[in-house]
Amino acid sequence: MTTLTTSVHEKINPQDFSKLSFDYLKVSSPFKSIIKELLEIDNFTKCLERTDRRCEVLLLDQENPLGFIVYKKALREDLEEAPSSFEIKSFEILDSVHSLGKNYQKLLLDRVIKLAKRAFSNNIILEVSESNKFINFFKSNEFNVIKTWKINSLATHKMALLCFPLSKQRISKASVVQDDSLTPLTSANFKRKREFEVKDKKTCIEQEDRSIDSRKRKRESDSEVDSIKRKREEHKDQESREKGAEERAPRIVSEPSFRPPPPRMHNLPMKGTIYFDYIMSGKKKYEGRVCGYACNSMRVGDHLKLFDRRAGWGIICEVTSKDQYRGFEEMLRDKGVLPMLPQLEDASRRLSEEGLLREGVKIYQAFPGSQRVHSAGSIAIGVKFIEKIYR
């Protein structure tokens, strides 16, 4: 019986791969609760609803999860260092799987590379903490650190943005995972697999060349159109000058008006429409959350969409301020309890200031995922009502 040696020198029996497969995370998935414990609630909800991201789970015998990846369906275009990037949101191997000695993380990475090539992306990127258990694995597989930053001044570890240029991509011999199932890696299968990969690589190169030629032709066509327009304008000006300045009114040439770009839109889920009413009436001036990527990326002047999917409606607000704190208590002391939790207005008449503060902290601690505030901190987002929206 032959064995396959991976890039990190772990020996894997090819017959083991016949029991492995990838499957999407769905509402009906029996392993849903296991994945939920490892994902943030917002990330988990978006994976189930398949709004802008998906979660693919590596399964043994089609029911036992070994690991999973979460990725965004749309390419990320806002990074100058890595344009047209395929973004990984989560990359996990279950703790119980590490003891098996298998190189399953390499299978997950090769699956990501296949998905990125299928989307015709130029790079693969992910944001990861420098304390993450997989950061050395990514660096050993040619992921480069583009930049690092701290979530807040209290964070002990920096965050790093890693990038993998697909032009340097090399398919691992351990990548035997197909779209629907995994087949045994016999000599014939491995030969056919290599032929398919070479053909697939040639196809991607040809498609990229065609895309470059198409963009080049479009630029040339646009240049010709602009040239014709300029000649027409020059001809009209010449005719006007020939008529004589006395036969026409003075022509006023106005400069093109500058249109600022539309504000960026951010989305946060909300359970319960009572807070919508408070924001619309002006009683709730701040939205409190645990620090995360979605909140940290906001800037003053951006727009924030708060939406309750069960109720089928929500609101759009303008972000008027953004302040970070070490925890809920510090946030409530600084901003005040009632501007953040107006529903405690009646309780404020019978409670002391400290008692009201404790009630506010209890409300925030009851929200799902609030335990992450000890490591990530909290954030108060100033909100100003703009309009009401429906599904």
Image: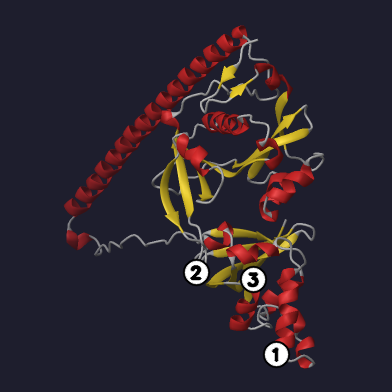
Depth check, front residue: 374 or 170: 374
Q: Quadrant of the N terminus?
A: top right
Depth check, front residue: 297 or 215: 297
Give the Cα distance between marks 1 and 3: 19 Å
Q: Is residue 261 above or below residue 357?
A: above
Secondary structure under the numbered disc 2 in the rendered image? loop
Position of residue 198 in the picture relative to residue 22 (left or right): left
In which quarter of the view is residue 313 placed? Answer: bottom right
Residue type, mark 1 in image: Glu
Secondary structure under the numbered disc 1 in the rendered image? helix
Identity of the residue drawn at 70% across and 55% down: 41
Give the Cα distance between marks 3 and 2: 15 Å
Please give the residue where the numbered disc 3 appears in the rendered image. Answer: 288
Give the Cα distance between marks 2 and 1: 30 Å
Q: Is residue 96 above or below residue 190?
A: below
Please give the residue where the numbered disc 2 appears in the rendered image. Answer: 300
Colour scheme used in the picture?
Answer: secondary structure
Q: Earlier in the sequence, mark 3 or mark 2?
A: 3
Q: Quadrant of the C terminus?
A: bottom right
The 10 Å Cα crowd at callout 2, few under 14, some 14 to 19, many 20 or more, is some
Q: Earlier in the sequence, mark 1 or mark 3?
A: 3
Position of residue 356 in the picture relative to residue 9 (left or right): right
Residue 275: horizontal and vertical position, in percent? 73, 72
Please give the residue where the numbered disc 1 appears in the rendered image. Answer: 353
Residue 346 in view in this figure: no
Depth check, front residue: 147 or 296: 147
Residue 302: horizontal and vertical position, in percent? 52, 65
Identity of the residue drawn at 63% across and 66% down: 374
